[in-house]
Amino acid sequence: MSQTMPTAKQRRLRSLLFWAVPALLLLLPFATNPYTQFIANGMLISALVTLGFTLVIGNLGQLAFANTAFFGIGAYGSAILAAKLGLPWLLTIPLAGALGALGGFLASAAALRGIRSYYLAIITLAFGELMRWGYLHAKPLTGGTDGMPMPPETLFGTSFSSDTLKFYVFLAVTVLLVKATLNLMRSRFGRAVMAVRENEVATASLAIPTSRVILVTFMWSGFVVGCAGALFSRHVGYVFPESFGMLHLIASFAMVLVGGLGSVLGAVLGAVLLTALPEYLRAFPGMEELFFGLIVAAVLVLMPMGLASLLRRLSPIFVERFYREAP
Amino acid sequence: MLMQLTLGGLSQGMIYALIALSLTVVYRSTTVVNFGHGDFVMAGAFVSYVLVVLAGVAFLPAAALSMIAMFVLGVLFNRGLVRPIQGGPHIGLALMCIAAGYVLRGIARMVWGREVLPMPAVFDMQPIFIGNLVITGDAVFIIGTVLVLLVLFFGLMAMTDLGKMVQAVYQSPRGARLIGLNVDRFNDFSWGIGAALGALGGILVAPVSLLHPDLGASFLIKGFAAMTLGGFGSLGGAVLGGVLLGIAEQYAGAYLDSALIEITAYLVIVAVLFIRPQGLFGRKAVVKV
C-alpha cells in the first residue's frame, strides 16, 4: 500500500468528523419539505444496501449478486413479522437483519462449496430470482403481486407515517451499522477479508480460517442489507415483489462503483449521490436503466476505484485500511 | 401428450441452445461471461421488429440485417468498453456487460415504454397432425433454422482451422499470440458472432411470443442454466443443455405445476452447481482451498 496512513492527530479529527456528520444531520428535518425528507430517508437505506454489497464484491472480492435477495428477505421479513405476528416494527429491524444473515449464510454455502467467480454470480442471481418467485407465489403470506401493506404504528405518540420520525430511526440504524462495519473492517478480521480477496490460498496457509472469513462476511453483509430491507418496508409503507428485481441490482452496482469498490465511505457517498437522481428520471420510462448503465460503464473505464480514491488522494483522513488501489 | 410436450420443449430448447451457444462462443475466446447477453437477444428481436413492421422489409432480409447490426454492435462493445478493462478483475467485466445490457434495455423502454408488441407470424403454415401430435409451423421453423445453423457452425469448427483457433485462444491467449494469431481481432469476431447468434435467438422467438424490453432477462438465465447443465465452456454441452432444459421445463410444467416453468432454469442452476458443478461436459468448476 503506497498510501500514507493517517497520523494520530488525523485519526482524532476523523473520528470527530464521523460523529459531526450525523450530529448535523439531526437538524436536517428542519430544513426539508416532506418530499426532500422522503428522499433523504431513501438515501440512508441505499447507503446500507450499498455498504452490504461492497463488503462482498469489494472487500471480499466475490462475484455474488445476492444483495437484492437479502434486501427482499429483510423487507418481507419485517413486513410479515409486523403485519402477521403483530410485532412492533422497531423490533423487526434486528430480526429482519437476522433473516438477511440467514440469506447470507445460504449464499456463502455456495461460495464455500467452491462455487466461485462466474458460477457464484450465476447461482446468486438465481437465488435472487427464486426469492422473487417465492414472494409472488406465497400469496397468503406476502400478498403475491399485490404486495402487502405495513400496519400503521406509533412511537411516543407520533405516527410512523411521519417521515421525520422515520428519519431519526433510519439515521440511528445507519450510523450504528456503518460504524460497526468500519470497526469490523479495521480489525484483524477485516485484514483477513482483504487477504482472502488478494490470495485465498496464501491466506489459508497463514492459518487464517478462510471459510469462516467468507461465511462471516456474507452473513454480516446479509445482516446489514436485511436491516435496510426492514427500513425500506417502513419507508414505502408497502412491500412489492417488483422492488427487488433487476433494477434494484443495477442501481446498487452503480452506487458501489461510483463510491469505490470496497470502501465504506464510498458506499455511503455513492448511495447519497445516486438515490435522488432516479426520482427525477422516473417520469421517463427507460431513463433510469439507461442512466445507471451509462454511469457504471463510465466509472469502470474512467475511474475504476470510484470517488473514494479521489478522497484518499486528497487527505489521509479518508484512508480506510481496506481498499485496492489498482483494480 | 408426452410427444407433444417433447416437441414443445424441443422448440423452446433450440432457442435456449442458441443463446447458450452464443454465450459460450464469447466465453471461450475472451473468458468474459456476457451478463448483458439477454438484452442483446432482446435488441436483435427489436431491430428485426422495426425492420419488418415499421420499414416493411420482408422477414428473412430483416433477420439478416438485424444479425449484421448486432454483429457490429458486439464488435463495437468489445473494442470500446470491454478491451480497455480486459486485464482487470472479473467483477469489472461482469459489471460492464450488465451495464451494456441495461443501456440497451433503457433505450428499448424509452422508445416503446411499457407496450407489449406482437410480431407478425412468419410462417403461415397449416399445423400438421400426426395422430394426436400437432406440429405448428413455428416449431418447424425454429427447430429447422437452429438445426441448419448448428450443422453449419459445428461443421465450420470441425472442417476449418477455425475450430483449432478457438481451442488455441481458449487454452492460452498468450500462446495463441505467439503462434501468430491476432487474438484481439479474434475476440472482436467472437463478440460479433456471439451477439449475432443471440440476436437470432431473439428473432426466432419474436413471432411466437410478445416483444417487450424485459424479454432478455429470462433468456439470460435460461442461457446460463443451459451452459451450466451442459458444462461451462463446452460448445456441444451448451446446445445439449439448452435442449434438455427446454424439455425439462415442459415436463415440469405439465406433470408437476405450471408455476414451475418459470423457475426450472434456476432450480437447474442450483442443483447442477451443488451436485455436479462441471455439468455434463465441462471442466473442473470448483475451487478448492
Image: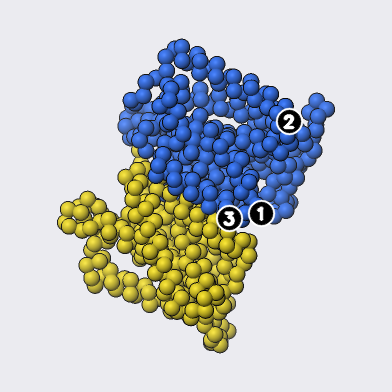
Chain colours: A blue, B yellow
Which residue occupies the foreground of this view, A23 or A230? Answer: A23
* Label 2 SS: helix
Q: Could you say which quadrant of the image residue B184 lies in?
A: bottom left
Residue A307, compared with residue B56, is above or below; it is: above
Residue at mark 3: A286
Which residue occupies the foreground of this view, B43 or B275? Answer: B43
Residue B142, compared with residue A213, is above or below; it is: below
Do marks 1 and 2 both belong to one polypeptide chain? Answer: yes
First in sequence: mark 1 or mark 3? 1
Badge nearest the viewer, 1 or 3: 3
Residue A230 can be seen in this image: no
Residue at mark 1: A136
Quadrant into which the C terminus of chain A falls: top left
| Residue B39 x, y percent position in the rendering | 49, 59
Q: Which amino acid, mark 1?
A: Leu
Residue A76, compared with residue B268, is above or below; it is: above
Residue at mark 2: A164
Do marks 2 and 3 both belong to one polypeptide chain? Answer: yes
| Residue B145 x, y percent position in the rendering | 42, 77
Residue A174 relative to residue A162: left or right: left
Protein chain holding label 3 = A
| Residue A324 x, y percent position in the rendering | 38, 32
